[in-house]
Image (cartoon, grey):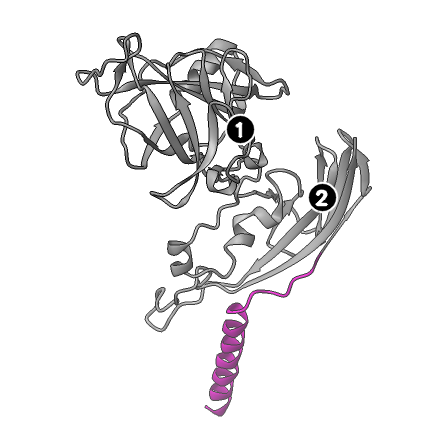
Amino acid sequence: MKTTYTKFILLLAATTFIACNEEEAPSLHISASADKTEVKVGEPVTFSIRHNAMAVSIYTGDDGHDYKSSAYYLLLGKTNDDLQNNNYRPIDPEITPYNCNFADTPAGSTSITDNLAEVVNAGSGDNLIGSEAEIEYDESIQQNVLKITSVHPEWWYQALRLHTDAKLGTNKKLNLRMRFDKDILGDVSSGEQRPDITTFQVVIRLGGIGVGETEVIFRDETVWDIYWNPNTAFTDYSVDLSSVIDAWQGATGKTMGTLSYIQILFTPSNNAGYLGDYYIASASYGDIDYIPFSTGQSLNINDNSGILKYQYTYTQPGNYQVVVIGTNTSMKNYSDSGYKDNVGNNIHASEYDYNTQFSTIDITVRP
């Protein structure tokens, strides 16, 4: 009886010991090396990875595969509340929202600060700031604004040009905050008031650069469905430029990669147009945009050799940090009630224990 009891205690102890061990992820070691750390574009690199991991992945460090732009890195340790209240997606550095506040330009200037905008003769390209346009102080909003003295609206004449100079993004909304001296249109021939017509035509044309090219191309293709009505109080006038961009692309046969500038004219319709001065406080276009999270390559572990090989070819010159990640996982840990319970508010909470280690290599790629 005593022998049986002793065996039972030993079996229970062994079972308890195994169970405790299964609740912890196995110990882990991982190290990575490369057959060469300096290569030319198009020259393959072979990575060797020694490990005892259950799962191995590699981030090669180039565009789309940068570990520090991955969801794993950016969301590590974030709670559910963090994820609900914040956007952790990587921002596209090539897409810059355009913002021009004319309050930043001193009164009497003949150019706009940082060359963010111009008023030009749409036919000759001559600068009109200092003659038919000027920066002046507006009492109604207590800041400097751009004033345009408009006498005769024509498609070839006074054009507001906004130098956006940024990669084309998802948001294509243009907004002008502006006011007009009067809220009624006039006959462009006689100057008589035309209360029967309440909106004037807005002609928007674009200068852009095709994908993979460098030359700025201006096209006078016009979308004839943009109409505004003049307000004497400062008002936000907004328009989505998607159809205007489509018109540019149709005329050039190219896909726009960069929006270089936006050119805006207020023109007559049915011989009626806005005759008078107007004032622009600010102009904006677009918004920040996001790129997808970077991804790594999961490597197949097909044997127990503890050695993995991975070959990769870089297509762009630069300095890249390669990150290799190994992970071991415990057996499933049940709560007292036998299923997932009280896992907490952390995004990484689970019924498993993880052991993760990293190995890094710096690679230089020459042209």
Residue 342 in sight here = yes
| Residue found 67% across the figure and 51% down from its top | 304
Label 2 amino acid? Tyr
Q: Secondary structure at mark 1?
A: loop
Asked if the residue under mark 1 is in contact with the one under mark 2, i.e. CB atoms within 8 Å, the reply is no
Q: Which residue is mark 1?
A: 163
Which of the pair 50/101 is nearer the observer? 101
* Location of residue 80 in the rendering, given as x and y in whole percent from the top left corner: 39, 59
Q: Is residue 269 left or right of residue 348?
A: left
The relative height of residue 113 versus residue 17 in the rendered view (above or below) is above
Question: Where's residue 206, x and y in %?
Answer: 48, 19
Relative vertical location of residue 244 with respect to residue 90 in this rendering, above or below: above
Q: Is residue 293 magenta?
A: no
- Is-magenta flag for residue 17? yes
Return the residue at label 2: 320
Q: Which of marks 1 and 2 precedes in the sequence?
A: 1
Q: Amino acid at mark 1?
A: His
Q: Is residue 227 left or right of residue 307?
A: left
The stretch of residues the image draws in magenta is 1-30
| Main secondary structure along the magenta-highlighted residues | helix
